Amino acid sequence: MEDDEPMNTTEDNNKEALEAEVAPALISVHPTHHSVAVAVGSDLRVFDLREGGPVKLGAESNEVFHHKESIRAIRYGAKGKVFVSAGDDKVVKIWATDSWRCVCSVPTEKKVSAVAISDNGQFVCYADKFGTVWVVELDESIENQASVQKKGSPLLSHYCSIITSLEFSPDGQFIITADRDFKIRVTVFPKKPLNGAHEIQSYCLGHTEFVSCLAFVYSQDCPQGYLVSGSGDATVRLWDFASGLLLHTCDVGSQVGNKEANGTENNHFVVTDLCTTSDGSSVFVAVQSLPGILLLSSDFSAKTLSVIRAVSVIEEDFIPTSLGTSLTSDFLWMVMGVSNLPGFNVSSLARVRVITGSESSDNHYNVLEDKHVPCGEQLLQHLQGSLSIDKDVFSAAAEAVKTSMRNLLIKKQYSSERREFRKRGRNDKKGKR
Amino acid sequence: MIGMELRDKVTEYVKERILALRVSNPGQYQNVSVVRTNLMKYIPNYFEKAQLSKMFFLFPDPHFKEKNHRRRVISPFLLDEYAYVIKPGGIIYTITDVEELGEWMKSCLENHPMFESLTEEELEADPVVKLLSCATEEGQKVSRNGGQTFKAVFRRVVLKD
């Protein structure tokens, strides 16, 4: 893919920088459905599903607890007791979910791109845009403490690559890291992670573009489970992660292509997020340019993934930027949104939709109307920031997210002339060494 | 035996040398080649787990500035990857004429739980060790200029709990 533009001016560089600042909205659901969290830009919004009201974060203390710049990763962990948020302001915030106090802050050197929490809540891992994964150890009874600051220790690194996703295996034995250089690494998570995770178990190699998301499918019969990965190459792949073996490749791009009128380039159908059901039977897939989601079925004995259906959102051009499920309910939560949208008077947008149902129910899946969403319009008002969304802002948002992801994760190809021009400032030219 | 080099020109040069050796020694040097690649990113794409018996890092780029230390070819993180492709018992050989880099590489290897140093006797007994400083053009250049070299030779061991 040759780039024939004229030499980069400062204006072009600034425009690129602005586009890169656009941050997609994120959603995460408490494992037993106590609450739902949405992050848009630097704004973290949590709604308590049991009380039926919005959560005021850090209400019990006077500290400054808001993120100052875009949040890039959020997650519940330790069976819902802990919540982590991190991003461009270079601070990982760890929250106790019963009081929603920020019990721990971890300053980081670089912007954070992904977070993961060990099952027992003892360790929080976070990855930065230079490819290094760090770990902090949480004290046992985090809820009762005053807020502490901790420093992370290096755990492992992907050389000069952005880590897009970080996950623990279902049994907690391994930590999986995916990067923008098409690689997935499976590393043994040691008993003393503060000394580093040095033993690589395997690599899952096969994707032909950046890997964007990871998830696991596992069941009672197959507790180890398999790894599912989504990528910019428009495929979702199934892996036996302990051996690195590719079990099945599901070409999502060709499925979407049939439905999309204007699928121009090949890399249009980037998989942006994945979510699995608690019984491991289904995988929900969010694809760039596809309103709604694709539903994949996972077959443990055949070791395959197949596209069952697309669940469309009819009234709106709703293309999710993030998906979330809990272990105990049938709701798939989706958010579409973006922050720092240039050129509009509303600088951020978030729209939450919920799909409910299952393969076994009569109608399969329904996209819920606003009034039928759990806690209804009160929830939507809080998590979205407003009840009504402008349609123009919607399509601009989808474009902005697509562009920023492409700029971040796809390596630019330059003509050799332009490449030489870009190298003009270097001092290690051919003559030397 | 395969050479993995980032720079196009150097790769071309090594390729020409190998082809010349094959011509002047018919039937020989069929087990030597070179590939242009970034091994720091893609080594697992080329080799399976525990496939290699030896790795050589000969006069690597010192990356003097502190901010570039993470680009050095021997680093605590990259040693995880080298440990993955080298089989237990396999050996890493490093040599440099830059003292600070020599200390850095030795210290990274010493601190890594999956590598242990060869003993003096083992170094004496290994015929490859002597070749590190004299068998390559860079090594010969260093000794012509009367420079000192710094070696670190370590064995890949199984991680102990």
Image (cartoon, grey):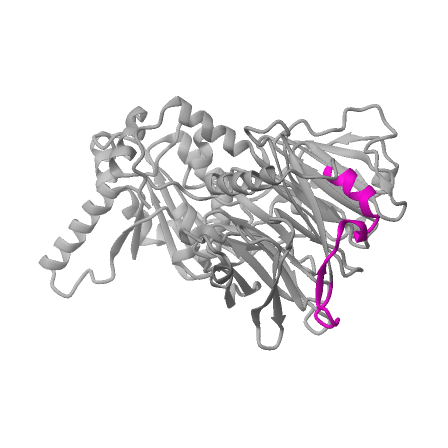
Asked if residue B34 lies left or right of residue A288, the reply is left
With respect to residue A232, does B95 lie above or below?
Answer: above
For the image shown, how many numbered marks are present on the structure?
0
**Part of the protein shown in magenta:** A357-384
Locate residue A226: give its quadrant.
bottom right
Quick check: can you spot residue B114? no
Q: Residue at x 38, y 57 (%)?
A: B46
List x then y, in percent, for residue A117.
70, 48
Q: Name the image quarter holding residue A92.
A: top right
Q: Quadrant of the N terminus of chain B?
A: bottom left
Q: Left or right: B134 with respect to A374?
A: left
Task: Say which quadrant the C terminus of chain B sits in.
Answer: bottom right
Which residue lies at the image location 37% right of the left edge and 52% below the top edge?
Answer: B55
Q: x, y (%) of residue A116?
A: 67, 47
Relative placement, left or right, of A256 versus A265 is right
Nearer-the-camera pick, A71 or B159: A71
Residue at the far right in the pictured view: A51
Is residue A419 within the magenta segment?
no
| Residue at (67% x, 26% y) in the render | A68
Q: Position of residue B42 (x, y in %)?
A: 41, 51
Whether residue B21 is visible to the viewer of this picture, yes or no, is yes
Where A257 sits versus A159, above or below? below
